Image (tube, helix red, strand yellow):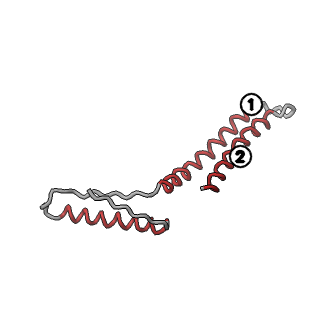
């Protein structure tokens, strides 16, 4: 078994290099399989990227779900807590509570992005 690791810092060149290497290994594997079998071994290849790339993709795909969830939660809490009694202002209390939670999540994401 042979394992090769290449460390690259430029994200754009990593994506291009990753795609090119997979294409080359795919072509080599096809050429090897088309040749008469004189050796008893197989070629397996795999390319993987950093954890930061995968985490960024997962978080960015979850953002629309989080927004829809908080909109539904705000609507539900506002309707469940508030009886649209403007004298008691319970409706605004529900909206304020959900709004403070939403702002705390935005601040948390902002601090996490600021500190890396």
Q: Which residue bears the numbered disc 1?
A: 81
Image quarter (top left, top right, bottom left or bottom right) of the N terminus? bottom left
Q: Residue at x 56, y 48 (%)?
A: 62
Q: Position of residue 27 (x, y in %)?
A: 28, 66
Residue 18 on image: x %, y %: 40, 64
Residue located 52% across and 50% down the image: 58
Q: Residues within 10 Å of mark 1 (few under 14, many from 20)?
A: some
Badge 2, how many Cα within 10 Å: few under 14, some, many 20+?
A: few
Instruction: Tell me residue 97's x, y (percent).
Output: 74, 38
> What is the quadrant of residue 48 in the picture?
bottom left
Residue at figure coordinates x 43%, y 64% from the top left? 7
- Disc 2 is placed on an element classified as helix
Front residue (pair 57, 74): 57
- Image disc number at residue 105: none
The quadrant of the rendering that contains the C terminus is bottom right
Q: Are marks 1 and 2 in contact (CB under 8 Å)?
A: no
Q: Which of pointers 1 and 2 lies earlier in the amino acid sequence?
A: 1
Residue tagged by mark 2? 103
Residue that appears at 46% across and 69% down: 13
Foreground mark, 1 or 2, reads 2
Numbered-mark total: 2
Marks 1/2: CA–CA distance: 20 Å
Q: Which residue sits furthest right?
A: 87
Nearer to us in this view, 58 or 78 = 58
Answer with left or right where residue 27 lies relative to residue 15: left
Q: Secondary structure at mark 1?
A: helix
**How far across and down, in percent of the image, does residue 57 sit?**
51, 54
99 in relation to 28, above or below: above
């Amino acid at each position: 078994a042979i394992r090769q690791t290449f460390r690259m810092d430029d994200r754009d060149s990593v994506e291009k290099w990753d795609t090119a290497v997979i294409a080359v290994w795919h072509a080599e594997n096809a050429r090897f399989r088309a040749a008469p079998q004189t050796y008893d071994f197989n070629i397996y290849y795999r390319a993987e990227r950093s954890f930061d790339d995968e985490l960024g993709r997962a978080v960015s795909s979850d953002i629309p779900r989080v927004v829809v969830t908080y909109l539904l939660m705000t609507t539900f809490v506002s309707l469940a807590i508030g009886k649209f009694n403007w004298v008691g202002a319970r409706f605004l209390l529900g909206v304020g509570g959900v709004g403070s939670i939403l702002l705390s999540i935005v601040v948390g994401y902002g601090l996490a992005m600021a500190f890396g």
